[in-house]
Image (cartoon, helix red, strand yellow):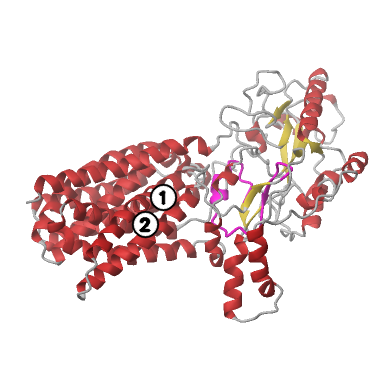
C-alpha cells in the first residue's frame, strides 16, 4: 500500500481548473460579496443568485480510479469507517445497538460514507461448538462470518448523476461520481434514483452526501483514507483496469483453493446496469450483502415513460377538441 | 452484472445457511426513500390542476373562441395562482429552498426534474402574460393578439410541465415507483381531465351555458377515457400494493377511488346544474389527490411482513 501511495505521490498534483471568461467576469462581480467586503440584504441575494453560475473549465481526464473490495479478507475492524469519518470530518453516529451482529452504523448515510456489514451464518447444530472455532467443521460455508466494507459504487452510468437537475453531481477527472455540496439543493432525485441506497440527505444542511472516493486526496496524489487504513488490504485502490486484473486473479486463486463460490460483483456491465468503479469480491448472493441481485438502471425506462405520458395527454386533448368541434354552434 | 459467462462472474450459489442462521441483509430494503411526502402529493395535484386548466382553456378557446373566450380569460389567472402555489410547494420541499435557482444552472434532458423545472419556468412566462393581459382586457385595455400569442406560446411548455411529473416519479429505483410505467400517462391524462372539470366549474359559475354544455360532455368522455391509464397504472402497482397492504386495505382504497370516478360520472349523466357540477368536481379532485397520496406513500410504507414481525 505504501508503494502504491508513493507511486501516486509521484504524479503531478492537479491544480484548480482554469475558469472561462464568463466565469471570471461573474466571479469579479460577486467576489466582494463572497469575501464579506459588501454587506446587506442585496449583496447577500446577489451573491446567492450568481454564485451557482460560476463555472470552471473541466479538468483534463485522468486514468479512471476506483476500489476493489475483497470481502474474503475483511475482518470487520471498521478502520475504514473511522478513517473515512476522520478525513472527511464526519460526525459520529452515536452508540446504536442495531441488533444485527457488530453492525452499529446500520447503513450508509450522509455522515457514514463507509459501512462495514456483518453477516453471521451459523447453523443451530454448530452453535454449541462456537467455543472451538479452530475445528474443521466451523470452517464450512455454513458456519462463517461474512464481512464487507460497503460504499458508493461510483457507477460508470450512475443513475444519481443522470437524475441530478442542478449539475451538482459530476463525474470527475478520475471518473468517480462526486457531489458538489455547494451546488446541491437537496431535491432528493439522486436518493430516489440510486439502486444501492447509497446517497442520503443530511438533516443538518439539507444537501445530499456520499463517498467522494477522497477526491481531495486523489488530487494531491494520495490514496483514499479507507484504503490507506485497511489493515488486511481488503480495500484496494488504484486504476480500475489494474484492479480488475488483480481481482480476477484473486478469484482464480480462491477457486483453486476450494472457494468455488467466489465471484466479482460490478466489475463488468450487465444488460441492465453499467460496470462500477467500486466493485466487490463476494462469496454469497449479492442480496445477502444488502446489494441488489440484478441492479437495474431506471433510465432504461425513461423514453417509454415519456411516450406514455405524452400519449395520455394527447389523447385527452384530442377528445376535448373532437367534442368542442362537434358541439360548437 | 453477471452477464459475463466466465466462471468468476457467474452468480455462484453457495450452500446457504439453514434454520437458525441469518441471511444477512437479504430481507432489508436496499434503496432509500427520498423525503417526498404529502407535500409532493399536493404538488402533483396542483401541477395537474394548473397545467390542465391552462391547456383545457387554451385548446377550447383556440378551437371555439366565440364560445370559450370569456371563461378562458378567467381561467388563465386562476391557473397562474394554482401554479404559483405549486411552485411554492416545490421550493419548500427542497432540502435547501434558498438554492432553488440552482436548478437553472444546467439543462439536462436526462433528468426529468431538470426538464420539468425548465418547462415550468418557461411556462410561467406566457401564462403570466396571458393572465395579465386577460385581466387588463377586463378593465378595457385589450391586447387580443398579444394574449392569443401568449396562449399559443404557452401550449408546449404547459404540456411539458404536465407530462414530466409522472416520468419523474417513475424513473427511479424505488420499490413500486420503478414499476409504474403508466404513471406519466395517468397524470397527464388526469391533468387534462381536472382542467376540463375546473373550466366547467368556471363556465357554470359565470353562467356560460353554451361552454358549460360542451364541457360537460367533454368531462364525461374524459372521465371514461381516464379509466384506461388509471387501470393500467393500478395493474403496474398491484404487486407492490400486495406487499404493502392487506386485501381489506386495498379494497377500502379501491372503493374510495372508484367512488371518486363513478360519482362524478353519475352526477354529470344525471344533470348539468351548478350544484351537481360542484359536487362532481369535488369528488374528482378528492379522488385525484387520493391516488397521488397513495402513490407517494409507497416507498415510505413498510411491507406487511416487516410490520407483522415476519422479518428481523
Report which residue position mark 1 lands on: B165
Residue placed most toward the observer, A203 or A60: A60
Comes first in the chain, label 2 or label 1: 2
Q: Say if B194 sits above or below A6 in the image.
A: below
Specify whether B61 is left or right of B82.
left
Residue A182 visible in the current orientation: no
Which secondary structure dominates the residues rendered in magenta?
loop
- Residue A93 on image: x %, y %: 71, 58
**Residue at 57% of width from left, 78% of height from top?**
A42
Determine whether A116 is above or below A27 in the image.
Answer: above
Residue A220 included in the magenta stretch of the image: no
The local secondary structure at tag 2 comes to helix
Tell me whether circle 2 and circle 1 mark residues in contact (CB < 8 Å): yes
Find the distance from the CA under tag 2 to the CA under tag 1.
8 Å
Disc 2 residue crowd, few under 14, some 14–19, many 20+, Cα 10 Å: many
Q: Nearer the viewer, residue B143 or A297?
A: B143
Q: Give the quarter of the figure containing the N terminus of chain B.
A: top right
Is residue A270 found left or right of A262 in the rendered image? left
Question: What kind of element bears circle 1?
Answer: helix
Q: Quadrant of the C terminus of chain B?
A: top right
- Place of residue B273 in the rendered image (x, y in percent of width and height, measured from the top left): 10, 60
Q: Position of residue A69 (x, y in %)?
A: 77, 36
Q: Which residues are magenta?
A: A173-199
Circle 1: is it few (<14), some (14-19), or many (20+) Cα within 10 Å? many
Where residue B2 sits: x, y (%)? 64, 25
Name the chain under label 1: B
Q: Note whether B164 is above or below A146 in the view shown.
A: below
Q: Is residue A230 above or below residue B102?
A: above
Instruction: Return the mark for residue A302.
Output: none
For label 2, the residue is B47
Same chain, labels 2 and 1: yes
Amino acid at each position: 500500500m505504501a508503494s502504491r501511495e508513493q507511486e501516486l505521490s509521484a504524479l503531478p498534483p492537479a491544480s484548480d481548473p482554469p475558469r472561462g471568461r464568463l466565469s471570471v467576469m461573474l466571479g469579479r462581480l460577486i467576489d466582494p460579496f463572497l469575501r464579506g467586503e459588501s454587506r446587506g440584504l442585496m449583496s447577500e441575494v446577489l451573491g446567492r443568485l450568481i454564485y451557482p453560475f460560476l463555472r470552471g473549465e473541466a479538468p483534463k481526464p485522468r486514468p479512471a480510479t476506483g476500489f476493489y473490495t475483497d470481502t474474503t479478507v475483511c475482518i470487520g475492524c471498521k478502520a475504514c469507517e473511522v478513517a473515512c469519518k476522520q478525513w472527511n470530518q464526519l460526525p459520529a453516529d452515536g452508540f446504536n445497538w442495531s441488533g444485527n451482529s457488530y453492525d452499529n452504523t446500520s447503513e450508509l448515510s450522509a455522515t457514514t460514507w463507509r459501512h462495514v456489514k456483518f453477516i453471521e451464518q451459523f447453523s443451530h447444530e454448530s452453535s454449541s461448538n462456537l467455543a472451538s472455532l479452530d475445528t474443521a467443521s466451523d470452517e464450512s460455508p455454513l458456519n462463517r462470518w461474512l464481512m464487507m466494507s460497503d460504499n458508493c459504487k461510483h457507477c460508470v452510468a450512475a443513475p444519481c448523476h443522470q437524475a441530478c437537475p442542478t449539475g451538482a453531481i459530476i463525474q470527475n477527472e478520475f471518473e468517480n461520481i462526486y457531489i458538489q455540496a455547494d451546488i446541491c439543493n437537496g431535491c432528493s432525485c439522486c436518493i430516489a434514483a440510486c439502486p444501492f441506497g447509497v446517497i442520503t440527505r443530511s438533516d443538518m444542511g439539507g444537501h445530499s452526501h456520499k463517498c467522494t472516493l477522497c477526491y481531495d486526496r486523489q488530487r494531491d496524489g494520495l490514496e483514499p483514507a479507507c484504503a490507506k487504513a485497511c489493515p488486511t488490504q481488503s480495500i484496494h485502490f488504484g486504476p480500475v483496469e489494474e484492479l480488475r486484473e488483480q481481482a480476477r486473479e484473486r478469484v482464480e486463486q480462491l477457486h483453486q483453493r476450494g472457494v468455488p463460490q467466489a465471484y466479482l460483483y460490478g466489475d463488468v456491465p450487465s444488460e441492465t446496469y453499467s460496470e462500477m468503479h467500486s466493485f466487490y469480491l463476494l462469496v454469497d448472493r449479492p442480496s445477502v450483502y444488502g446489494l441488489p441481485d440484478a441492479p437495474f438502471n431506471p433510465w432504461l425506462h425513461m423514453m417509454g415513460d415519456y411516450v406514455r405520458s405524452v400519449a395520455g395527454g394527447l389523447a385527452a386533448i384530442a377528445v376535448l377538441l373532437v367534442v368542442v368541434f362537434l358541439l360548437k354552434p | 452484472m453477471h452477464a459475463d459467462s466466465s466462471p468468476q462472474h457467474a452468480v455462484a450459489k453457495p450452500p446457504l445457511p439453514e434454520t437458525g442462521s441469518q441471511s444477512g441483509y437479504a430481507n432489508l430494503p436496499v434503496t432509500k426513500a427520498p423525503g417526498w411526502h404529502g407535500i409532493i402529493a399536493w404538488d402533483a395535484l396542483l401541477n395537474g390542476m394548473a397545467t390542465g386548466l391552462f391547456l383545457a382553456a387554451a385548446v377550447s378557446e383556440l378551437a371555439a373562441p366565440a364560445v370559450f373566450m370569456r371563461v378562458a380569460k378567467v381561467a388563465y389567472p386562476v391557473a397562474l395562482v394554482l401554479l404559483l402555489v405549486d411552485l411554492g410547494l416545490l421550493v419548500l420541499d427542497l432540502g435547501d429552498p434558498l438554492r432553488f435557482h440552482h436548478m437553472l444552472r444546467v439543462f439536462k434532458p436526462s433528468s426529468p426534474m431538470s426538464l420539468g423545472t425548465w418547462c415550468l419556468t418557461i411556462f410561467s412566462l406566457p401564462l403570466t402574460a396571458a393572465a395579465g393581459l386577460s385581466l387588463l382586457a377586463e378593465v378595457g385595455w385589450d391586447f387580443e393578439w398579444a394574449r392569443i400569442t401568449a396562449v399559443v406560446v404557452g401550449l408546449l411548455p404547459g404540456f411539458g410541465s404536465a407530462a414530466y411529473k409522472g416520468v419523474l416519479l417513475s424513473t427511479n429505483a424505488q420499490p413500486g415507483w420503478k414499476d409504474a410505467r403508466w404513471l406519466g400517462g395517468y397524470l397527464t391524462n388526469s391533468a387534462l381531465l381536472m382542467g376540463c372539470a375546473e373550466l366547467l366549474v368556471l363556465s357554470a359559475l359565470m353562467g356560460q351555458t353554451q361552454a358549460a354544455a360542451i364541457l360537460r360532455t367533454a368531462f364525461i368522455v374524459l372521465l371514461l377515457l381516464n379509466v384506461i391509464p388509471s387501470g393500467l397504472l393500478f395493474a403496474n402497482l398491484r404487486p407492490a400494493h400486495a406487499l404493502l397492504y392487506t386485501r381489506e386495505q386495498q379494497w377500502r382504497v379501491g372503493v374510495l377511488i372508484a367512488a371518486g370516478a363513478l360519482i362524478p360520472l353519475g352526477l354529470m349523466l344525471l344533470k348539468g346544474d351548478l350544484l351537481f357540477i360542484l359536487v362532481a368536481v369535488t369528488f374528482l379532485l378528492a379522488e385525484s389527490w387520493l391516488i397521488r397520496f397513495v402513490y407517494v406513500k409507497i416507498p415510505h410504507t413498510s411491507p406487511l411482513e416487516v410490520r407483522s414481525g415476519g422479518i428481523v
